[in-house]
Amino acid sequence: MPAGWCAAMAEFRMPSLGADMEAGTLVEWRVAPGESVTRGDIIAVVETQKGAIEIEVFETGTVRDLAVEPGQKVPVGTVMARIEAAAGKPVAAPAAPAAVAAVAAEPRLIAPKPPPPRPALAVAPPAPIGARRLISPAARKRAAELGVDLDALAGSGPKGVVTLADVEAAKAPPPPKPLAPPAKPAAADQARMAAMRRAIAAAMTRSKREIPHFYLATTIDLTGLLTWLEQANRERGVDQRLLYAAPLIKAVAVALKKFPELNGVWIEDRFEPRASVHAGIAISLRGGGLIAPAIHDADTLDLDNLMRGFRDLVGRARAGGLKSSELSDSTVTITSLGDQGVETVFPVIYPPQVAMVGFGSIVERPWAIPGPALAVRRVITATLAADHRVSDGHRGALFLRALDGLLQKPEEL
């Protein structure tokens, strides 16, 4: 390090993984003091009401110390580690979430644990060159049957003779049968679900108390889109086929680029628009509960990559393998209850976001088409819940109209 140059030290803090999170429990560190990390690396796993979340680092440098031990419950904003920037690349410490006060007490540092000593192995001393090992005939025969290496045995008989008992003792025990993971007690599952419901209740209560919602709905003809999907899927393998969720998500993301007042967050009494559209997808969890991780930059992905991202996100959300950025970066949330047979959903905005888009089930309805004529078409109801502090019904209506127009040209998405 050049003389007089002071390395910048960043504080890695417990991130906020949603408006309903107050603290998390550190499950494990994936790094140790002295290790180098790169922005985006997974360095810890934290247990929240939403499950185990992999936490990413947002600095590049060297881990200097860890301030929290596994098993410890950590409030949002608490310093968990300190990272020294790479030489010549000083970094600024990320600010703690605005709604959370920094922890005043100096955290206790954890010294790296030395590796446990390896147990010494009893190995026969090498025989002198030309010396003949003393092995009983019965021991030699049994060793051949069991596949035991006689050169590795130290004889216990007179003058170091390898006996039958030595061979039997050296027989490797059969590998243990893999144990099935213990099932979680029903009481633990109920406690986790109760904690999740409390967190959801707190976030939704805050939403309805602080956010002046307004709602709009429109019915969109999806016949052309569904026909286009059916034709496109004929040329694809089963694992590459597109679900209609992909064009719905893409159309919402593209439409939001034209209406930036619906894509962002409300923090400290002001609206902060976001340049990128990170679409949070409401996913129901097995056993109950909801989570809404984000597909990053959804407006820039083609339908194939968006579909892969959607499948991956749903799988990891239900298996408990989400990353922290997927829970903290959403700029808007999309929900659909179409698979439950619900025709219309009026969502509650997830703070600090300012909008949420909902889709119901696809149903057949009589529909006027150019001609004039009347036909049976497959339609869907799209709804918008928006924050009246940031937008209004006029802009919301234009957004839904733009969404409708995009869905009429799926080949351009």
Image (spheres, rainbow, N blue to C red):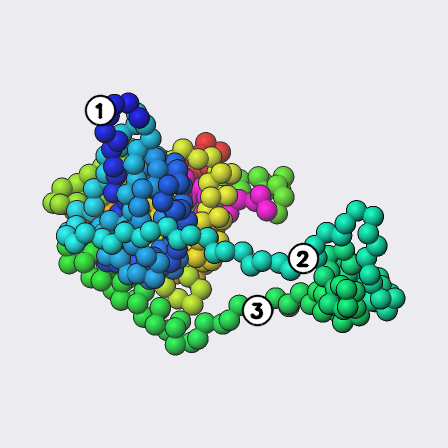
Res. 25 image quadrant: bottom left
**Which is more N-terminal, label 3 or label 1?**
1
Res. 186 image quadrant: bottom left
| Image label count | 3
Q: Which label belongs to residue 123?
A: 2
Q: Can you name the residue that lies furthest to the front here?
A: 159
**Which is more N-terminal, label 1 or label 2?**
1
* Residue nearer the viewer, 393 or 79: 79
Q: Secondary structure at mark 2?
A: loop
The structure residue drawn at horizontal position 58% and vertical position 58%, both measured from the top left corner, is 120
The structure residue drawn at horizontal position 53% and vertical position 68%, both measured from the top left corner, is 181
Residue range of the region highlighted in magenta in the rendering:
239-250
Mark-to-mark CA distance, 1 and 3: 57 Å
* Residue nearer the viewer, 156 or 196: 156
Give percent across and percent down for residue 324: 35, 48
Disc nearest the viewer among 1 and 3: 1
Give percent across and percent down for residue 22: 23, 58
- Kind of residue at disc 2: Val
- Kind of residue at disc 3: Ala
* Residue nearer the viewer, 227 or 336: 336
Q: Which label belongs to residue 4?
A: 1
